[in-house]
Amino acid sequence: MTDANPAAPMRAQGLAAFMREKSALRLESLIVLALLVAVMSYASPYFLTLANIFNIVLATSTIGILAIGATFVIGSAGIDLSVGSIMAFAGVVGAMVAAHLGLPWWLAVPACLAAGAFAGWINGLIVAYGGVPAFVVTLGMMGVARGVALLITDGQAVYGLPEALIWLGQGRPFGIPVPAIGFIVTAIILHFVLTHTRFGRHTLVIGDNEHGAMAMGVPVRSLRIKIYALSGLTAGLAGLFTMARVNAGDPTAGMNFELAAITASIIGGTHLFGGRATILGTVIGALIMGVLQNGLNLLAIPSFWQQISIGIVLVAAVWLDQLAKRGVE
Amino acid sequence: MATLQLREVKKHFGPVNVLRGVTFDLHPGECVALVGDNGAGKSTLMKIVTGVYSATSGSVILDGEDISGTPPGAIRELGIEMIYQNLELAGQQDVTANIFLGREPTRTIFGLATNIIDFKTARDQAEDMIRQLGARLPSVDIQVGKLSGGQQQSVAIARALTFSPKVVIMDEPTAALAVREIEHVLDLIKELKSRNIAVILISHRLTDVFEVADRIVALRQGTVIADERTGETTMQDVVAHIVGAH
Amino acid sequence: MKNHLTIAALGAAVIVAPVTAGAETLLYGAILKTPANPHWNAMTQGIEDAAEELGVEAVVSTVANEGAAEQQLNNCETMLLREPDALIVGAINSNILLPCLKRASDQGIAIVDLDYNLDRTIAEDAGVTVTFTAGNDGESTGAVGADFVAEQLVDDLSGPVLVLEGLPGNPVGAARGKGFRDRMAEIAPDIGMTTLNGDWDRGKSANITNDTLQRNPDLKAVFAANDTMALGATEALLAAGLDNVIVVGVDGTSDAIQSIKSGRLTATVGQFPYLVGKRSVELLTEKFQDHTELDSYQSTGQSVITQSILEDGSDEMIQYLR
Ligand SMILES: Nc1ncnc2c1ncn2[C@@H]1O[C@H](COP(=O)(O)OP(=O)(O)OP(=O)(O)O)[C@@H](O)[C@H]1O
Ligand SMILES: [Mg+2]
């Protein structure tokens, strides 16, 4: 009914605008990644080898999987500060199942996933029905999950897993580390879920306008519960791989990983206040952090430089994005 | 028989009494204008009809069945659509996503129902709907937040009309529009009436109200103080009801 | 009426406290870190066992986590109310407890520093008199690790060797790393060494080990400032199919011992926190009861634990593993 002249059609103004329009993927983060790869390749002859690339993906897998879960949560305008603790909790539960309880090794897999999803589900339940802000709920869970992990292990890592379980962390079929495969497969599946299913699209819609979604009949509460449970599930998966990789369920694992996961997601273009997010962007964000760490390790540069550079990249990526937006509008 | 009946609908938010027992009927093909001062309770009443709020007491009856307390999604399934005062669009999502929000067509795989969205169907239907409405949008793939106010209103209207509703509620649909666009909304309401769809129009523009409405219901402080046929009242009378000069 | 009762109750508490503290039995207040860390659990056991053996009283206070410095200060202040004869302190950092410890010093309370957590220079500047420090200083621990690694690599002392320190800025990890490097450089001046921060984290240490292998596929040894990092490195090496790289950790945690037993981790420089706690109480009691003069630094012993030692029990220190 608007007969009046429509606003000038938004033509894709170059690739950046096109990508913003189509996928919410920041071209900026790809550029940053490419630049980093170029610099690192120049600085270290060991950087750009197939073995090292697998190595980077392996090192990125834990934070990457957590960040994929965080992408759903932040996309829905929520926050989950408990994933680092849930990861430790799930790893400990899985390790106890496999090492202490005399159960078949493979039960550790559903045990980790269930432990993670359960903790996330509790988060979701309280956020959705208790009306307590997610920041507070997940901050509480951060303490509870870590505390329970320490409690049930008496503070000692659960060491000594069955070989078959260790393979999940240390195996390299076709030369590719299993956790790296797990990371990539998780990314592909959850990319599809986010972009192609009602659950995924509704996740972004409630991050955009929760009230509107509710008025249009989106079951906002059950959706939130699912989102936090998913975040717990990915934390459980990260816990599984880490546990298998280091051959121990370590109750102190994953300290501060929630912040790294959020950082990766934000670098990758997830809108901090919800509504826009892509898994591909998050994977790139996580890889940026992984490449930085790997490169600086190869160059034997002390780790405060790693912290400094990741901080700079985070702010730079978001700032570049703001600049680009202003340029378009 | 009336399509929609409101019976003694009451609502209070904590100690604040917003609706003190509202009763009126809406018939097929009829347009009722709901008028009243700011804060009279018009939007609240309509949100009770759509299930966004639940009434403290009283009932909402659709085609003879009490639908009070039904959640928003199910109310839409029953054929009541509302264009909200603030449109309730998701600004970062595209036009298609907004039109199909909550009712995305899904695909079956090997004969099994899935939650996978059928984007092609959705997009085609969205384009169709926009064309039927004569709305001029650059593309249904554009983020709604980047559209002009009038264009956004078109999207909200398209969303309400895509699923052949029985009742359409419009909460100040012309507030953000230029004169020519207002004409389009009024034409649209007439068209809905001719298709036997019942319309509730909330508006502060009495000229619009007198152009399209069959009846005028005036709310003041949460009660109906007048329910008159358009032909049997005058603008002065309606103004008097609204401001409480009677 | 109610008010009177409360006051009475308070009065009772105040009166009772000094009585239980007892002028006869010696009272030691231990201000430790978190019981979530097995290290401090073993320390607590050592303190309590020794106290029971010697017929002295020990009260142990702990905090919620490794970062709860304020809480530890509160624990210290509360402990002073009990008027202990000595404070046994595992300080979270080198300065937070100083005001409390100063008051303790002023009251003539003996102060034992556990594990070199206090900086003695800073403490003395603040007017705190430390009676003695019990434990092993990080540099000597690193040196013990270096001696062991050099012994293992004796045929080829060219390296490369990876050194994993803890969180950046943590003095214990840094001292252990420095001790290792210094001794190693003495033994083998040309050895190639790389130092990185494993942040006390298993996964991070595994990543660093993988990265280092890209650059140094011929990696000979890893020295990590604690067992957690050493175990991460071990698993990364095994995953890469390398089972002949020497990996040495520090502490002697139960998972490290299990790993050594099963032939994965090469060795750990055992710290025996149980013994640190036990010796502290024993030394204090000697001081009070026999008026012995004590050295200001009391080494409680450390020793390299390997698979063969665990199998044949040739080092009696292993009885103190917890
Ligand atoms: N969620 C709420 N909580 C508390 N009070 C509310 C809430 N929603 C509405 N109200 C109050 O109810 C009254 C009626 O509001 P409502 O939005 O229904 O008015 P209206 O008739 O639509 O006004 P307008 O013409 O300005 O849109 C107002 O006083 C408003 O402050
Ligand atoms: Mg209103």
Image: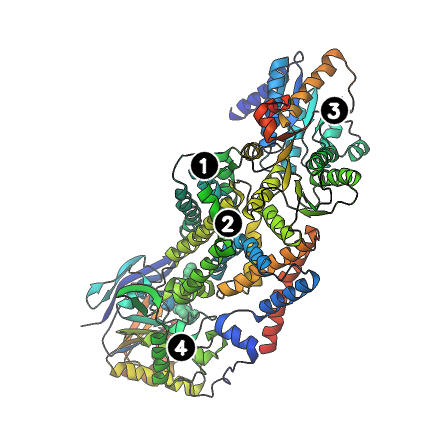
Residue type, label 3: Gln
The residue labelled by disc 2 is A83
The residue labelled by disc 3 is C298
> Which residue is pictured at 54% across the width and 51% down the height?
A258
Label 2: how many residues lie within 10 Å, few (<14), some (14-19) or many (20+)? many
Residue type, label 2: Val
State if disc 4 and disc 1 touch (CB < 8 Å). no
Q: Secondary structure at mark 3?
A: strand
Label 3: how many residues lie within 10 Å, few (<14), some (14-19) or many (20+)? some
Quarter occupied by the C terminus of chain B = bottom left
Residue A1 locus on image (x, y percent) = 39, 84
Q: Secondary structure at mark 1?
A: helix
Q: Are marks 2 and 3 on the same chain?
A: no
Residue A61 locus on image (x, y percent) = 53, 54
Residue A53 locus on image (x, y percent) = 58, 59
**B200 or C253: nearer the viewer:** C253
- Chain containing mark 4: B
The residue labelled by disc 1 is A99
Give left or right: position of C111 versus C200: right
- Chain containing mark 2: A
Query: Which is in the foreground here, disc 4 or disc 3?
Result: 3
The residue labelled by disc 4 is B155
Residue type, label 1: Ala
Label whose residue precedes the other's in the sequence (1 or 2):
2
Give left or right: position of A124 versus C294: left
Quarter occupied by the N terminus of chain B = bottom left
Query: Which is in the foreground here, disc 2 or disc 4?
Result: 2
Q: Is the shortest distance between ligand 1 and the CB of mark 3 under 8 Å? A: no
Q: CA distance from mark 2 to mark 3?
A: 43 Å
**C152 or C235: nearer the viewer:** C152
Is residue B202 visible in this depiction of the protein? no
